[in-house]
Image (cartoon, helix red, strand yellow):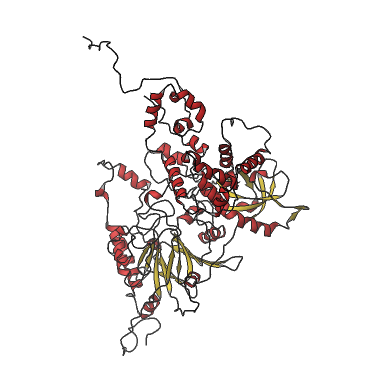
């Protein structure tokens, strides 16, 4: 007889030993959409114009179709809107609509030429809070292969950023700028059914009985620095996840968690490109060592992360994504964290030579990442895409930005403009081909959740996961009911 | 005392070539394409005539060309090899191989029928090269720099942009010719990524 509040000190002693709750297995099928070729097969000689071309070519059809549906019978002052092929072919006074890529002209955007003139080493550019010019001198343009068209209009005060594909209806003014009345974007793509990939893999048609799905726990921004201040909350989290904390109620809750997703920024200062402060301290050090200084490497953060993972892994499979401050490549899509970082926990993972995924242990995956958990399609990012987008707009909630990214079908619209990115030439995996059921973004300032709907009945759950180091919160998503819970681990000050 | 100068005996025949400040192979101005293409002769006839009397110079130049290709060239080389390794030809390739020369000429006539002025500076180019250059300059198939022409055609085809099949026919025919690499790299790519170190010939 377990009392409701979990306190075992009230009531009679138990007769039977309390049952030990067990965890179910997690049904997991990752996709390798963002894996890049290794080594010498990765080329960098192509231009980024290829990426913009691919984005426009792949999304143009969808946008045109949506715009046709919306504006085919649109009339203004007795004039019907016509579709113009090239952006520069708009005629003055004629009501028409064009499709192009948005380009925001902002002088506060990081400019590579400034950095070259100031320093000789590659250092992260100074972090700017926002690129928006307070005096309003920013311009918005619509671009395609023919050229750029400056656009103005009140409807454009909403959140448009460089890289999204838009259809704009309006007319050209005398000074050459295009006055926009309405805009249209591609909106959500087709959403697969739950369990679609598993069912299509099966050859027999018999419907297998599946167990009730559990919950997935998402934590991001562990921010392990190696000093003692992260020990306490990390240990509390560990105890909660392994079911050692508190009482039977919480333990049975925790027993429902079937998988943990670590969404980026697990290590606090491990990015290969130093921030300005780190670089300044290194430069001022007395000893000038040419090349790599091995004595400066501090292995404690990685060891702490490894021991944390090793203690959780026997009870629960983990998917770990790299983040902005993790030792992975800086350009998107970030490749999986190397198993060399996890000397102990890699025994729970398949070696990369054998297989590129681990279904029941530690799966080190790319950022952004796409996969199927319990049949639901999940799209997760470490948060760099959302952070960068927020710098282009003012007073916008991160959840709104996440919704817009899905509706534009671009996972990283500001790449390659202000977000470092690999120059794709053949195919752009950063475009949304299939609508996910759950979209996660890690390292956000605050927790947020929203369910959005698409034109064809798609439903997506958006979850913004806060930084664990600052808030101590982790997010639990129930995969049967799509409910989201927030669990906070921390120390309660007595008497406050 | 100043060092003893070597007496002017019979001039020893040295292996080194003599300095030559004249001739097509020793131009001081930056031809860009010329330097990279001395081996791969696009403008074959005029260059060859001038090089005949200076056989040694040409030889030295050829040796220098054995250096590592630039990264841009290396990537195009690899893309061409990858494309060539595809043993089974796709349906559009099959169709392209069946296109006759007459049809290609008719296609070209149709392409330039809308031109208001005659094409300047294209007298020395073959019909194939003219067709390929027009394909390079068509912006709707994407940028032509940093990508092999065949790969660009296939990418445009995959994206549903309907690139003309005659261009594929010309590309496949040229591939069977002698200069596989020169054909795959667009002219603009060579101009933009020209090698600056092939000028010094001493």
Q: Answer with the quarter of the image where residue A14 lies.
A: bottom left
Quarter containing the C terminus of chain A: bottom left
Q: Nearer the viewer, residue B72 or A450?
A: B72
Residue A38 locus on image (x, y percent) = 38, 53
Q: Is residue B88 above or below residue A440?
A: above
Residue A44 locus on image (x, y percent) = 43, 46
Residue furthest to the top in view is B1
Q: Answer with the quarter of the image where residue A125 lies.
A: top left
Quarter containing the N terminus of chain A: bottom left
Residue A95 locus on image (x, y percent) = 72, 49
Q: In this view, does A290 lie above or below A31?
A: above
Q: Nearer the viewer, residue B112 or B58?
A: B58
Residue furthest to the left in view is B1
Residue A279 seen anywhere in this rendered image of the structure: yes
Residue furthest to the right in view is A78
Q: In this view, does A394 lie to the left or right of B68?
A: right
Tally of numbered discs: 0
Residue A158 seen anywhere in this rendered image of the structure: no
Residue A456 locus on image (x, y percent) = 61, 67
């Amino acid at each position: 007889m377990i009392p409701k509040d979990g306190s075992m000190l009230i009531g009679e002693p138990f007769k039977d030993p309390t049952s030990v709750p067990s965890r179910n297995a997690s049904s997991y099928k990752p996709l390798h959409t963002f894996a890049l070729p290794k080594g010498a097969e990765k080329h960098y000689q192509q231009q980024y114009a290829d990426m913009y071309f691919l984005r426009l070519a792949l999304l143009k059809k969808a946008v045109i179709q949506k715009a046709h549906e919306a504006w085919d019978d649109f009339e203004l002052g007795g004039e019907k809107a016509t579709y113009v092929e090239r952006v520069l072919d708009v005629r003055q006074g004629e009501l028409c609509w064009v499709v192009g890529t948005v380009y925001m002209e902002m002088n506060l955007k990081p400019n590579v030429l400034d950095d070259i003139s100031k320093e000789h080493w590659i250092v992260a550019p100074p972090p700017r809070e926002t690129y928006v010019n307070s005096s309003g001198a920013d311009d918005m343009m619509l671009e395609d292969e023919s050229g750029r068209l400056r656009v103005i209009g009140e409807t454009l005060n909403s959140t448009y950023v460089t890289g999204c594909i838009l259809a704009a209806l309006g007319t050209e003014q005398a000074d050459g700028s295009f006055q926009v009345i309405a805009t249209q974007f591609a909106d959500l793509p087709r959403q697969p059914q739950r369990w679609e990939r598993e069912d299509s893999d099966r050859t027999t048609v018999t419907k297998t009985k599946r167990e009730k799905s559990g919950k997935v726990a998402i934590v991001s921004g562990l921010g392990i620095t190696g000093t003692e201040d992260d020990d306490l909350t990390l240990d509390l989290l560990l105890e909660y996840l392994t079911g050692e904390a508190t009482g039977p109620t919480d333990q049975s809750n925790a027993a429902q968690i079937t998988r943990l997703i670590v969404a980026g920024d697990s290590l606090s200062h491990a990015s290969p490109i130093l921030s300005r402060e780190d670089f300044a301290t290194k430069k001022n050090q007395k000893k000038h060592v040419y090349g790599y200084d091995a004595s400066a490497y501090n292995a404690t953060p990685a060891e702490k992360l490894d021991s944390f993972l090793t203690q959780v892994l026997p009870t629960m499979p983990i998917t770990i994504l790299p983040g902005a401050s993790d030792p992975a490549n800086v350009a998107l899509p970030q490749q999986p964290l190397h198993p060399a970082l996890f000397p102990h926990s890699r025994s729970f993972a398949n070696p990369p030579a054998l297989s590129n995924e681990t279904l029941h242990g530690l799966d080190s995956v790319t950022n952004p990442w796409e996969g199927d958990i319990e049949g639901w399609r999940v799209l997760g990012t470490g948060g760099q895409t959302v952070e960068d987008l927020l710098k282009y707009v003012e007073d916008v909630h991160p959840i709104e930005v996440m919704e817009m990214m899905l509706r534009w079908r671009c996972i990283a619209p500001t790449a390659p403009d202000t977000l470092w990115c690999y120059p794709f030439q053949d195919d752009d995996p950063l475009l949304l081909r299939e609508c996910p059921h759950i979209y996660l973004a890690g390292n956000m300032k605050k927790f947020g959740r929203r369910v959005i709907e698409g034109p064809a009945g798609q439903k997506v759950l958006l979850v913004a996961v806060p930084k664990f180091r600052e808030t101590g919160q982790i997010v639990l998503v129930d995969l049967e009911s799509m409910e989201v819970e927030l669990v906070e681990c921390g120390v309660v000050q007595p008497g406050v | 005392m100043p060092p003893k100068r070597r007496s002017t005996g019979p001039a020893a025949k040295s292996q080194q070539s003599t300095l030559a400040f004249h001739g097509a192979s020793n131009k001081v101005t930056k031809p860009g394409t010329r330097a990279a293409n001395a081996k791969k002769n696009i403008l074959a006839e005029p260059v060859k005539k001038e090089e005949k009397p200076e056989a040694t110079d040409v030889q030295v130049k050829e040796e220098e060309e054995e250096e590592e290709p630039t990264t841009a060239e290396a990537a195009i080389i690899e893309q061409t090899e990858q494309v060539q390794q595809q043993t089974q030809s796709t349906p559009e390739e099959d169709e392209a191989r069946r296109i006759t020369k007459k049809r290609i000429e008719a296609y070209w006539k149709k392409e330039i029928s809308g031109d208001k002025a005659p094409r300047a500076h294209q007298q020395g180019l073959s019909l194939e090269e003219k067709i390929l250059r027009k394909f390079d300059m068509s912006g709707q198939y994407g940028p032509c720099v940093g990508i092999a022409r065949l790969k660009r055609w296939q990418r445009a085809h995959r994206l549903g942009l309907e690139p003309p099949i005659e261009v594929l026919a010309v590309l496949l025919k040229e591939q069977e010719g002698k200069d596989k690499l020169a054909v795959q790299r667009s002219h603009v790519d060579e101009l933009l990524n020209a090698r600056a170190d092939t000028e010094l010939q001493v």
